[in-house]
């Protein structure tokens, strides 16, 4: 019985994804801006965007890393006049963001798609995270997404087209031990994205929230060093994904206009369970949610029990 239900749902989702391909937006010859584009998921997104025929601007702070990334990304260009450039900029500084973004539109062209990938993770039990780090995390992850987004939406609304991608995390759906401030910053982004989607909807501008699981990036390596054992054990159950795979799903979901973008089973089912009042962007998804949410709540509770058991065990070891 369950197998049959699963098969039907899978078939509907597959059908939607393949038959309605025509609804995909195109970024060919369009200007795509990627913050945090000099490494990790951002760099992979930029490389893919170039392969889709876009003009790409990556934004990062470190000039050297930016130059190396631009060279690497340029190799993917295949059209005459296809442009790739890097802009060194701190996305948490509103005045700088404002100046650079208007400059960028003049030089390269109207921004059609903004992919916010700038972000970082600092782990630790709350009492072990310095106030300095708390501010850095909230500034980078939240304001570092809000400022660039604020700069592009007015023009997108005027042109009645555009795509905004916000990179959150699985931690935007579930609060996890050792990630209190990080989770808070990502939960904030989810709320921001839901409200923004409502504001942008009449203007033909779509908003997509990426919910990547642990991804094999320089950022993750850094984060790994500060992770409490409990966090490593709890997050370990999801496995670790390649940034290329995350970037591929992110771009496809954004072009399709999905609100959530997930990678892998765990991420998909967590998003399904935590969907709440998020706008439904596909019939297949809606059917899957209606049928699976009840049973998934039971599975979720079992996982949570397991997580709490890990925490108890670490305490007494
Ligand atoms: C975390 O904070 C507690 C209480 O301030 C302290 O005893 C402990 O040594 C700290 N642990 C680390 C890893 O900094
Ligand atoms: C919405 O934007 C897409 C490109 O992103 C465009 O092809 C389409 O014509 C637009 N629709 C309206 C109603 O403006
Ligand atoms: C993260 O750290 C754990 C041990 O703390 C180690 O086993 C694991 O390989 C590390 N992962 C990465 C990607 O560095």
Image: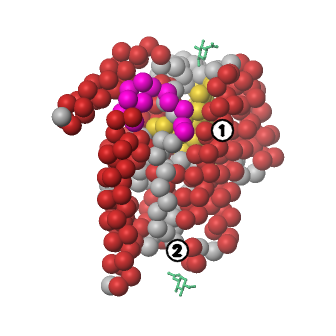
* Mark 1 neighbour density, 10 Å: few (under 14) some (14–19) many (20 or more): few
* Distance from mark 1 CB to nearest ligand 2 atom below 8 Å: no
User: In the image shown, does 56 or 262 lie closer to the viewer?
Assistant: 262
Q: How many marks?
A: 2
Residue 310 in percent (x, y) is at 34, 72
Q: Quadrant of the C terminus?
A: bottom left
Image point (49%, 27%), residue name: 281
Image point (46%, 51%), residue name: 170
Residue 199 in percent (x, y) is at 69, 31
Q: Which residues are magenta?
A: 277-289
Residue 195's disc is 1
Is residue 6 at all visible to an observer of this figure?
Answer: yes
Q: Is residue 112 left or right of residue 256?
A: right
Is residue 63 at all visible to an observer of this figure?
Answer: no
Q: Quadrant of the N terminus?
A: top left
SS type, badge 1: helix
Q: Which residue is mark 2?
A: 125
User: In the image shown, does 80 or 13 lie closer to the viewer?
Assistant: 13
> In this picture, is 18 found above or below 135?
above
* Distance from mark 2 CB to nearest ligand 1 atom below 8 Å: yes
């Amino acid at each position: 019985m369950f197998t049959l239900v699963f098969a039907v749902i899978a078939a509907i989702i597959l059908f939607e994804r393949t038959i309605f391909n025509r609804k995909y937006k195109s970024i060919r010859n369009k200007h795509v801006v990627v913050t945090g584009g000099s490494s990790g998921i951002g760099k992979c997104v930029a490389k893919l965007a170039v392969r889709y025929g876009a003009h790409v601007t990556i934004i990062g702070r470190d000039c050297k890393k930016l130059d190396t990334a631009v060279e690497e990304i340029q190799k993917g260009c295949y059209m005459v006049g296809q442009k790739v450039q890097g802009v060194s900029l701190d996305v948490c500084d509103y005045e700088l963001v404002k100046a650079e973004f208007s400059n960028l539109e003049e030089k390269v062209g109207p921004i059609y798609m903004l992919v916010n990938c700038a972000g970082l993770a600092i782990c630790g039990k709350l009492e072990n995270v310095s106030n300095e780090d708390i501010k850095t995390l909230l500034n980078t992850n939240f304001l570092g997404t809000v400022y660039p987004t604020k700069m592009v939406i007015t023009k997108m609304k005027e042109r009645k087209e555009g795509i905004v991608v916000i990179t959150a995390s699985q931690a935007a759906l579930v609060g996890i031990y050792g990630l209190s401030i990080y989770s808070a910053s990502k939960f904030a982004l989810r709320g921001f994205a839901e409200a923004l989607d409502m504001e942008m909807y009449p203007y033909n501008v779509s908003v997509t929230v990426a919910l990547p699981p642990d991804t094999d990036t320089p950022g993750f390596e850094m984060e790994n060093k500060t992770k409490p054992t409990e966090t490593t054990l709890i997050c370990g159950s999801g496995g670790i994904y390649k940034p290329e795979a995350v970037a591929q799903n992110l771009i496809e979901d954004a072009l399709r206009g999905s609100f959530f973008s997930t990678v892998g089973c765990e991420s998909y089912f967590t998003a399904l369970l935590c969907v709440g009042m998020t706008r439904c962007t596909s019939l297949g998804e809606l059917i899957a949610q209606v049928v699976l949410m009840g049973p998934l709540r039971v599975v979720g509770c079992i996982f949570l029990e397991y997580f709490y058991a890990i925490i108890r065990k670490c305490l007494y070891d």
